[in-house]
Amino acid sequence: MSHIDLPTLHDKIRTCQLCPLSLGRKCAVPGSGPSPAEIMLVGEAPGREEDLKGLPFVGRAGKLLDTALSQAGLERSEVFITSVVKCRPPENRKPKKEEINLCHPYLQAQMDLVHPRIVCLMGNTATQAVLGMQGVTNLRGQIQQGRFLITYHPAAVLRNRNLMEEFVSDLKKAKVK
Ligand code: SF4
């Protein structure tokens, strides 16, 4: 898919029917941000607000992410944000393995086109999907393969504010060249 440009890729995602998540979505959420971008953030899946608006991280977890980015000295406008699957799973359940596998070529194509220096994998689903590794609590703060920075998902930080300090400290590592 790397032969197409990013807007065309995102149009393809918006009309994609490759997996059953297309049946329940209102809007697919390809992602947003500059391209090329130094930093890419990868979450799990769109939630209710994201599904309604077609934009990533626009709900409460998105507000927390904005705050964490700001505390790390970053602006949302300078990072490209997307997720492992681009359509909302019913009742916000975790995406299934087959859904993740079917959607993965889109994420791979985004990484090829946006060409980030660092890809921040937020949460277990993103870490498992991209690196095949589990256990964010132990892995967080690590940079794997010189490029993939593992940290918490903002929704986890929303549930447990004690994680905020570590989340911000991880995001700071994405900033440092
Ligand atoms: S989640 Fe991904 S593979 Fe499934 S329908 Fe949406 S864009 Fe297509």
Image (tube, helix red, strand yellow):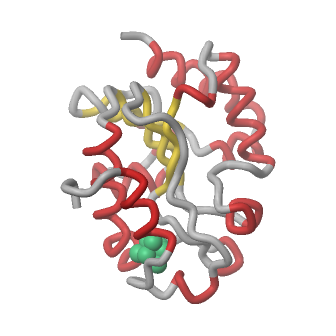
Can residue 148 be spotted in the picture?
A: yes
Q: Nearer the viewer, residue 73 or 112?
A: 112
Give the residue displayed 62% in from the left and 52% down from the top. Answer: 56
Q: Position of residue 42 (x, y in %)?
A: 47, 46
Residue at 45% across / 66% down in the picture? Answer: 11
Which of the 4 quarters of the picture holds residue 36? top left
Q: Is residue 106 left or right of residue 27?
A: left
In this rendering, the answer to whether 122 lies above or below 146 is below
Q: How many numbered discs, if any? A: 0
Q: Would you say 166 lies left or right of 159 here? A: left
144 relative to 80 in the view: left or right: left
What quarter of the picture does the C terminus occupy?
Answer: top left
Q: Is residue 96 visible?
A: no
Say left or right for 17 vs 167. Answer: left
Residue 138, how many percent across, how many down?
Answer: 45, 37
Q: Would you place residue 22 above or below residue 121 in this image?
A: below
Q: Which residue is drawn at 77% across and 34% down?
A: 161
Q: Where is residue 37 in the image (x, y as percent from the top left)?
A: 41, 30
Q: Quarter-wise, where is residue 62 in the image?
A: top right
Image region (quadrant) for ligand 1? bottom left
Q: Which of 77 and 45 is in front in this view?
A: 77
- Please determine whether, in this image, residue 72 is positioned above or below residue 158: above
Nearer the observer, 111 or 121 = 111
Residue located 51% across and 65% down the image: 86
Give the position of the N terminus as an image quadrant: bottom left
Q: Where is residue 13 in the image (x, y as percent from the top left)?
A: 44, 68
